[in-house]
Image (spheres, rainbow, N blue to C red):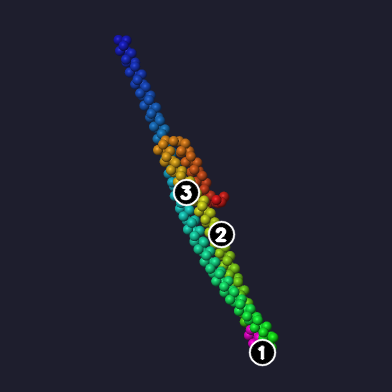
Amino acid sequence: MFYGEAMSQESLEAHDLMESLSESIEKREEKRDQWNIKVALTTSILAVFAALSNLESEQKTSEAIMLKNSAIFYQAKASDQWSFYQAKKIKLHMSENQVHLVDLLHSSRSEKDRLEKLVLKYKGQVGKIKKQAIGFEEERDRMNALSDRSLAHHHAFALSVVCFQISIVLSSMAVMLRRNSLWYVSLGLGGLGALAFVNGFLMFFHL
């Protein structure tokens, strides 16, 4: 009889142990499920920001290329105007020399008047052409500056894309390997990517 009671007590203890172990496993699985949900949520957020950063990066690249093409266009226009300016300048000097020659040869007054009118005409054209050439150069410089600014924004967004993508990979590895440390590193890189993303708009520091 004593033996039977002992066996019954041992069975109860084993049953209690199994229940305790089962509850412990359930709690661990519940915590693990909660952790997986957190990782999945942060990974989704990182993926959204990575997509937005990539979109902004491509847009700024296209903008920089377009502005650089505009700068090249204005440079070509400026070069054409300076060539035109040189041609008119040569004609102006030739007309001025002819006026001096008329004075030396004491030619007719009508010839001198004609040449002087030509000199005034070429002087007006030279001044106008020079002003246009300088205007084209100023516009070229403005387009180059805007292009460089767009490129700086692109670099900031490109950095954020890299940070977000690496962060997503680390989050996936954290789930597979069940390593909290990898997830924390992923969050750190995600924070750096978010900082670079904001910098892409505000440019409070240049890369």
Q: Earlier in the sequence, mark 2 or mark 1?
A: 1
Three-letter amino acid code of the residue under disc 3? Val
Give the x, y percent position of residue 139. 56, 65
Give the x, y percent position of residue 107. 67, 89
> Which of the 4 image quadrants contains residue 25?
top left
Give the x, y percent position of residue 164. 46, 46
Image quadrant holding the N terminus, namely top left
- Looking at the rendering, the stretch of residues picked out in magenta corresponds to 107-116
Three-letter amino acid code of the residue under disc 2? Ala
- Name the residue beneath numbered marker 2: 145
Q: Marks 3/2: CA distance?
A: 25 Å
- Name the residue beneath numbered marker 1: 108
Q: In this view, does 179 lie above or below 10?
A: below
Q: Marks 2/1: CA distance?
A: 56 Å
User: Is residue 122 visible in the rendered structure shown here?
Assistant: no
- Name the residue beneath numbered marker 3: 161
Which residue is at a point 58% across and 65% down the rendered structure image? 138
